[in-house]
Image (spheres, rainbow, N blue to C red):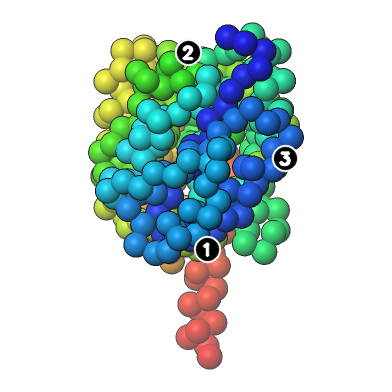
Amino acid sequence: MTHNLFFSIIIPTYNRASFIVQTIHSALSQTYSNFEIIIVDDGSTDNTHEIVKNLVNEKVHYYKIKNSERGAARNYGIKASKGEYVTFLDSDDILYPNYLQNAFDSLIRENYPPFLHTAYEIKNSEGKLLYQINDLRSDNINFITKGNSLSCLGVFIKKEIMQDFKFNEDRELAGSEDWELWLRILANFGIKTNNNITACLIHHNSRSVLDFNESQLFKRKELALKYAFLDPMVKELFTPYYKKIDAFADSYISLHLALAGHNKRSLKYFLQSLKSYPFSLISRRTMAILKHVLLNNLNRLFTCVV
C-alpha cells in the first residue's frame, strides 16, 4: 500500500435531488485530492439524474440501478470503486474539507488499519448543533453494544475487506444494515478511531432512517441480531453482551415511538430494555425518551385545555 492512498467516497441516493448537490460539492471540496466519488442512484423517481449528470467528471461517477435499498446500492458502489479504502456518505449529509486528509493522516499513523472511524457532528436543518460523536476509543467495543454510533459517516474500510464483508441486502433490514455490518467487521478486525470532527450528519424530518413503523423497527432489530450472530467471531466476542445489545436496541425503538407521539408503545419498549439491562437507565437515550414522552403529555394536556 502506497503513502498516496486513493479513496472511494460512495454515495447511495434515493429521491434526494434537493440535498445531493450540497453533498457532492462538500465531497469535491476536499483538501486531499486523491479520491473518486461514486454515486449510486437507487432507482430515484425525482430529477436526481438530471441534477447529477451536470456534475459528472473525472472524479464523479454516476450509476443508476433498480431500486434495491441502500445496502445493495452501497455494495454496487463498492464493486465499482477503485480506492484502497472506501468511505460512505449519505446524500443528505456533508463532509468538511479536511475529511480525507484527517483520515489519511490517521491511517498512516495507525499503519493502515482495516477499519477506521473518524468523528462527526449532527446538526438540524437550520444548522443548530444537536450533538457530536467524538468520544470513541480504539479497540473499545463498548460503544457498539449501545447501538449504532457509527452510522455510515466517518467510516473507512479497506476495499479488500469489503469484498468479503458486504452490507446485508435484506430489504426488511434496511436502516440497520450498517449496524449489522459494523458488528461483524469490528468483531473480526477491531477498530481504530480519530475524534477530530470532519463531517456533519444533517437531521431533518424526511431522513429515510426515521421513516419506519413499530413492526418494521422490531423486525430490523431481530434481523440485525440474527444475521450478525451467525458470524463466529461476533458470537464469540458479543455473546456476553447480548442482553445489553438487545436492551439498547429496544430503547432505540422506544425513542422512535416517543418521537412519533406513541407514548404507551414507547414506554413498553423502554421498560423492556430496563428489564434486559437495568443499567440502560443511565444513558443519554433514556433522557431523550423521557423528555419526549413528557412533551407529548404536555402537548395533549394543552390541547385539551384549549
Q: CA distance from mark 3 to mark 2?
A: 28 Å
Residue 155: image location, x then y, percent: 55, 30
Residue 189: mark in rendering: 2
Toward which corner of the image does residue 272 lie, by quadrant?
A: top left
Q: Label 1 is placed on what type of residue?
A: Ser
Q: Is residue 236 above or below residue 47?
A: above
Of the image marks 3 and 1, the number of the one nearer the N terminus:
1
Q: Is residue 148 left or right of residue 113?
A: left
Toward which corner of the image does residue 247 lie, by quadrant?
A: top left
Task: Tell me the mark number nearer the camera, choosing from 2 and 1.
Answer: 1
Q: CA distance from mark 2 to mark 1?
A: 37 Å
Task: Tell me the mark number nearer the camera, choosing from 3 and 2.
Answer: 3
- Seen as rendered, the residue at the extreme front is 58
Q: SS at mark 3?
A: loop
Quadrant holding the N terminus:
top right
Can residue 113 be seen in the rendering of this structure? yes
In this view, the residue in front, 112 or 172, is: 112
Residue 4: image location, x then y, percent: 66, 17
- Name the residue tied to disc 1: 18
At 40% from the left and 54% from the top, the residue drawn is 14
- Name the residue tied to disc 3: 97
Q: SS at mark 1?
A: helix
Q: Label 3 is placed on what type of residue?
A: Pro
Of the image marks 2 and 1, the number of the one nearer the N terminus:
1
Q: Is residue 144 above or below residue 66?
A: above
Can residue 224 be seen in the rendering of this structure? no
Q: Is label 2 in contact with label 1 (beta carbons under 8 Å)?
A: no
At 42% from the left and 64% from the top, the residue drawn is 47
